[in-house]
Image: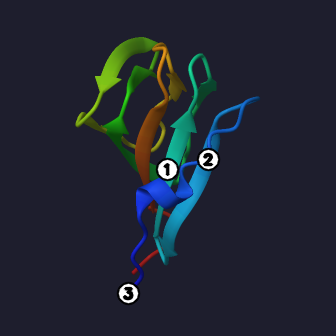
Amino acid sequence: MNKINIDDILDFATEKSARKAIFKEDRVDTGLLLYAPGQTTPDHKHSDIDEVFYVISGEGTITINSEEMLLKEKDIIFSPNGETHGFKNTSSNNWVVLQIKIDISKKD
């Protein structure tokens, strides 16, 4: 069992958003999405991954299938495979999002 303190891996890049890996085991991959003000991840989709996003701190918008939604601290959202999604930090503070990926192409 591994323990990680999130404060120890917060490292915001100035030029673009960053993903910091936390744990990866078989079908599950967790990481932090780190967005400085104004940073984005373009709309994209995965055919073989379900994702859960939980906002640890800050706020920003997620676009899901062309619908924009505000996500703030303690909000959680599920994005199933095949759904288009993208992110934008629309605030003046850093935005930290826990990402949990579940690879549905792998069988138990």
| Residue contact between numbered discs 3 and 1, judged by CB atoms under 8 Å | no
Tell me the element at label 2.
loop
Q: Which amino acid does label 1 sit on?
A: Leu
The residue that mark 3 highlights is 1
Which residue lies at the image location 27% right of the left edge and 32% below the top edge?
Answer: 73
The residue that mark 1 highlights is 32
Q: Check the image and report above or below for 75 versus 32.
A: above
The residue that mark 2 highlights is 11
User: Picture quarter containing residue 36?
Assistant: top right
How many discs mark residues in the rendered view? 3
Find the residue positioned furthest to the left: 74
Q: Check the image and report above or below for 9 versus 90.
A: below
Q: Where is residue 35 in the image (x, y as percent from the top left)?
A: 56, 31
Q: Which amino acid does label 3 sit on?
A: Met
Q: Nearer the viewer, mark 3 or mark 2?
A: 2
Tell me the element at label 1.
strand
Q: Check the image and report above or below for 46 versus 75.
A: below
Tell me the element at label 3.
loop
Judge from the rendering whether residue 8 lies leftward or rightward of residue 51; answer left or right.
Answer: right
Q: Which amino acid does label 2 sit on?
A: Asp
Q: Where is residue 26 in the image (x, y as percent from the top left)?
A: 49, 78
Q: Residues within 10 Å of mark 3 (few under 14, many from 20)?
A: few
Judge from the rendering whether residue 78 lies leftward or rightward of residue 41; answer left or right.
Answer: left
Q: Residues within 10 Å of mark 1 (few under 14, many from 20)?
A: many
